Image: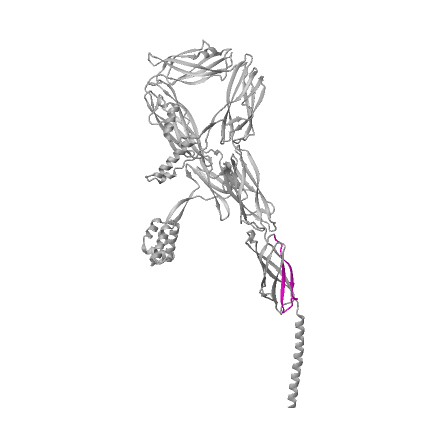
Amino acid sequence: MNRKSIGVLIGVLVLLSGINATLAKEELLFEGYLNKGDSILVGPLVIMLQDVQKDYSDNQYKAMILILKDGKVLNMEYASIKVPNGEKIQELLTNTTFLAAMAETLGYDPLNPIEFAQFLVWLENASEEEIIDAVFKTIEEHPELGISKDELLTTITYPNIELVGENETIEVEVDGEKVLVTALQVYPNGARISISGPEEWKASMISAYLTSWVETPQRIRPGDEITIRVHLKNEGALKAKYITVVLSPTPVSLTPSPSGSTDVLVQVASQSGVLQSALLPADTAVKYVEYLDGKEERVLEFKVKVNENIDPGIYPLYISMAYYIQSEGTMQMVQGFNYFSITVIREGDASFELEYVKKPEIVHPGEDFEITVRLRNMGFESAKSVLVEMNSPIELTKEAILIDNATNQHFTYVINSDKTVEYKFRLHASEDANTGSYPLSLEVSYFSGDSKEQKEQTFEFSIQIIKRNQAFIEIENIDLEPSTIEPGDEFILKVKIKNVGDEAAKAFSLKIEPNKVTIPGEVTKIDLSSLQNLPIQGSQAISENLQTALNQIMEQLAKENINPFLPVGEDNTKYVNEIKPNEEKVLEFRLKSDERLENGVYPLKISIEYLSTPNDEKLSDERIIGVNILGKEHIIVSKISTSPTRVLPGTNNVEVTFEVENIGSGSARYVILKPMPNDPFELSETSEQIINLGTLRQGDSAKTSFKINVKENTKGGTYEIPVKIEYKDASGESKEELIKIPVIVKEKPKIEIEGVRFDKSPIQGEDIRVYIRLKNTGGEQAENVVIEGVVKADQPFTLPKRSDYVGTLDPGQEGEGVLELGIDRNAIPKEYTIQIRIRAVGDKESGDDNVYVFEKSITIPVEENIKARNTLRIAGVIVGILTAIVILWTYRRRKKS
């Protein structure tokens, strides 16, 4: 191999490696099902299944997929179309000459006042489409007007998104990276798609999720008016709508209120104490944002006035957020919180912040332990003669926790601005300390700069003490039987407990405590539509607003507080005499959920109480268990119909339409139907093989259909077509069901020729009668049966009597019809086949008015006419003899003369 060939080979290999490297960058990021309206976040893109439409040219469903970045559609092109110019058409309709021509075009006489008035009445009541069609028709039929269509058209440009069918791919380039979106399968309500792109991108189905962070001034003094900048970002793929952001000293729980924003402000003031706070809003504590798109950011500014008489220190602030997200056709409210703090200092004063506390999570009685703290001087001045002391703020703590006198105080001569210092304290938990939480305080005293006035600051935290030699009951596991609970169901609650302490627990009791929840009650809607007829301005708006407000008030008043779960056949308490260390017990309760509960998680409150050996100390605790009321789906089919209504043997493309309904109390997600017809049916080639219905919630229904072919020899009767349903229940478990759709196949008449006879032999040159015996071998009565003979042009036959009426034939009954057949005398003797057409009407009493045509054939054996041939021979001999006599006579006569 020469050097040139080697160089070419190396070049090809380099190119191929470059191609492979490029391809390797594209990885499968997502493959799964999307319902119409669903979105998925892929890297910087939002990919949305906007719609599914049926393309009737190829009878296939196609998907409209939008690929968006920063709110712009990347796979959208623009197209132009000419549409009628409304202003010019309106101008034409004021022209009397054109109106007269238009009236004539539509069949009215413009010179007849009555007909022209009728035309004007039509023009007043006609739709816009009808008028435009009439205008263009007038222009076509009256060229003398000198108006062209183009004069009345205007061009508009509109966005055009190409629909994609199964196994078709959309390719876009984003920031130099290639993204491929392929529709693997397309269903009436959704599609299964795959998305490939850069390997570092991630895919997320999150709908909308708001995060926040805060910017505050580093130095804040009493009396300052400061600006707090709250940064919001929607990390999800869909819009977060109607966003309410509250700045307050404590978290605020926002709930929807029919009264609007005023109630929100009052709620903020009542829950957070903002009206009495040392930090007062300079303008408003509540901000509203209409919506944030996926990955969109927004900055909100809050003006806060710092009280002039405030003491230096650290003041907490909370960001409380409430927003709505679109979830499968409904709006759901989501709440979020974030916490930050501001440090207020005086001009030039030193001020400390507790940056860090290191302490054990649990301390047992009799143990030694250490606490390390870190303080930072946040002021502008140095802190001098700093004394840091650990103390017990309450008497109970002094008895339980002993602080080492050698380390309970620390002194530092000076701590400069923005510097930190760590201090370590040694402590001891008393041997007889009880289980509990004990507060400790860190007291800091110092002089700021050259000031002669001593300043003090206090920070608090707590220590958890748990006795070693004590029984301690833990709830290890909770089971529900059945695992899926519907409203009104009875279920068994199994509580597994274990003594993880060092001593035995005696006289143990576990009690289900009453715990009220609020549910919506029954409301009778108020109808104030009659107020719309009041003779006052705006009566309709007044009645609608008043009706809405009253109904909202009624809904609030109708709410009830109920116990979601009640014991059945037993009391609400279980007892155990003794539980030894490491011993486990399972306690069972038979409970019933209230029938009025909606789907959701409901709290079940339990309390435990027991005596711990050796000193029989009484211990108690309360726990909250969340019980998920999911409901159970129940899928049925209803409203079954076929097109055509009468399904007959041999019919193709019979459309079976039905509704799938969820009459249960739970949701069924990703519902897919697979028709599986068996003999005597088969799926039509134009039928949907797999049908995607999306999500069916409680009470939802979806209409769908598939097509079948019916075999020719199918007997009448009711048949069932199996349809497999696959879906996921509310708990995410995959389920399969098999439903059967009944289809009634009707009988139809079927006429056969049982026999043929002739009144005489079919010979050349004769007219014969052909008697045809018929039999109805079908399952339905055949009415008005008529037979008709059909002779081809090249056959030596005529039909003096072409058809005959047979009458009505019941199933199994025979009848006879007669045809007259003329045979040409020159017909070649042989067997001929002629066509017999049989017409019949179905049984009208059973609703069958179809006309059935049966094409049959019979054989006519034409024989030679021997008698006619002999007659001709005799006639020929006689003619020959006569001719000879005439010749002889003529000869003799001439001879004599």
Q: Is residue 806 left or right of residue 404?
A: right
> Can residue 18 be seen in the rendering of this structure?
no
**Does the magenta-highlighted stretch encompass residue 758?**
yes
Quarter that holds the N terminus = top right
Is residue 317 highlighted in magenta? no
Position of the C terminus by quadrant: bottom right
- The image quadrant of residue 678 is top right
Q: Magenta stretch: dominant SS?
A: strand
Above or below for 450 versus 532:
above
Taking 593 as reference, is 215 left or right? left
Residue 891: x %, y % from top left: 65, 86
Residue 811 position in % (x across, y down): 62, 54
Is residue 47 shown above or below 893? above
Q: How is the image coloured?
A: one colour
- Relative to 826, residue 230 above or below: above
Q: Count up the numbered dots.
A: 0
Outermost residue on the top side: it is 405
Left or right of 648: which side holds 354? left
Q: Nearer the viewer, residue 42 or 496?
A: 496
Residue 157, image x and y in percent?
Answer: 39, 46
Q: Residue furthest bottom?
A: 897
Image coordinates of residue 623 in percent, x first then y, are 51, 22
Q: Nearer the viewer, residue 624 or 850?
A: 850
Q: Nearer the viewer, residue 17 or 531?
A: 531
Give residue 139's quadrant in the image. Answer: bottom left
Answer with the quarter of the image where residue 229 lies: top left
Q: Which residues are magenta?
A: 753-778
Is residue 783 among the parts visible in the rendering? yes
